[in-house]
Image (spheres, grey):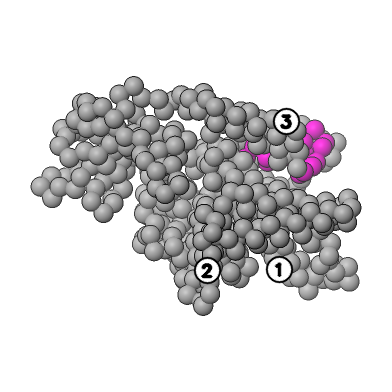
Amino acid sequence: MIAVLAVVIATLLFLDYYRPSVLLYETECATIDSLRTYRFVLSSEPRETKKSWRYETEERVLVYIAKDSARAHPQAGDTIIARTRIRRGGKIGSFDYGLYLRRQGIIGQAYVRNYETYPRPKGKEDKTIPLQKRLYRRLAASGLSGDELATTGALTLGYKEDLDPQLKRHFQASGAAHVLAVSGLHTGIIYGLLLWLLTMGGRFRPRYENWCGRALLHGVIIAALWGYAWLTGLTPSVVRCAVMLTIVEGGVILYRQSVSLNTIAAAAVLILLVRPLDLWNVGFQLSFAATTAIVLFAKEMELFLHRKEWVGSLKGKVYNWIVGTVIISIAAQLGTLPIGMYTFGQMSNYFLLTNMIVLPIASLLVPCGLANVALGGTLVGKGVGYVTHALAWAMNHAVDWIESLPGSVTHVQINGYMVGLLYAAMVMGWLTLHKSLWWLVGVVGAVGTFCLLYFGILTGSIR
């Protein structure tokens, strides 16, 4: 599967370079940049920017409507007719924003001042409101509000519209941005919770020879995981985790248990065959980079730090939990660091401290948030809402405190070649441990070349 994945990626890169229309045909528009009268059906809630309201539309165009104090802005489900131009979006430095939009399935963006509004039909309000928004309102009905409501909505439902920009910056600077994006972490929490509930804490797990019982148990888990993935908008990171767990659970049903590089590669191939543009999605890249690094390096770190004399004792359980969190954090950070530095231009220096505090809170907050979604404004729901509010408050203030520590963020600037050098050094480092010490020469060469290029960027001789 690793070889198949390499062929798939090479094919997609070749098509994107020589014939991008093969991949981007859904965003072709014959009237691009032409001044015409367009009809847009607004499919998202309005998002306020400095001078306008931004909407997604059924026509796959981002529409920016200028603010006007004399009239109310349209709502999701409304139809507007306006004379405007659809533009691709230009380059921002070396970043091709237009190509970025097309890779997200968006044709372009239109700015509107004068328009006519046709309200959505009466009686169909609920159908036009996105499912995430409706479930988000159930969270609010359970007593959550403010930043705590926004954080819980982002963690539980992937709904980020109400997140305060400053709160986002705090999460990014502290190294906790991955918590806000519904990803494999959240899906893994749901998976563990489902397995615990369906087996009553492991007491009623089907016997090894009971194939029907195993198939029923793990079939229900697979269906529930895909239901959660659909609930959160089928983001690349959640789809990756759902596909991987589906493969793993299918293996359990067939008496084969394995989480390996082949499993990861199989998940990537299946996703790219259905959604080839996900290859350029940062969430897809970070998700697979983190998972691959965990599979490659976590076991080696665990063997190095394992304490046989503490097995079975309370001290051993606490030690294993701390070590496990540290190992997973370091391995995931190692895998995502090059992409993070290249894409965001910064790295968090306290990511270990952040994960030690935030991950336990997230493990409790996600199931509590889902309970609030299910119970809504009922008496029990409001009771759970107090617990959820306290957990979200604790998470937000912990992230704010870590971000305020001196030296919490280091700003860096690297190019694509340097990203390749870092990953080459990691691969050769793994080969050094498992194959031959001669690979260490390659590690030193890759790291040395990276340092020379980085020095060139700092001095301005390389851009």
Q: Residues within 10 Å of mark 2 (few under 14, many from 20)?
A: some
> Label 1 amino acid?
Ile
| Up/down of 16 relative to 357, above or below | above
Relative to 47, is 363 on the left or the right? right
Point out the stretch of residues depicted in magenta: 242-260
Q: Where residue 35 appears, x then y in whole percent?
A: 22, 28
Please give the residue where the numbered disc 1 appears in the rendered image. Answer: 322
Please give the residue where the numbered disc 3 appears in the rendered image. Answer: 4
| Up/down of 249 relative to 166, above or below | above
> Label 3 amino acid?
Val
Q: Where residue 458 appears, x then y in whole percent?
A: 54, 64
CB under 8 Å between callouts 1 and 2?
no
Which residue is drawn at the image coordinates 54% and 40% (left, top)? Answer: 280
Predominant SS of the magenta segment: helix
> Label 2 amino acid?
Val
Q: Quadrant of residue 256?
A: top right
Please give the residue where the numbered disc 2 appears in the rendered image. Answer: 409
Q: Quadrant of residue 350?
A: bottom right
Q: Which of label 1 and label 3 is nearer to you?
A: 3
**Farthest-out residue, left:** 70
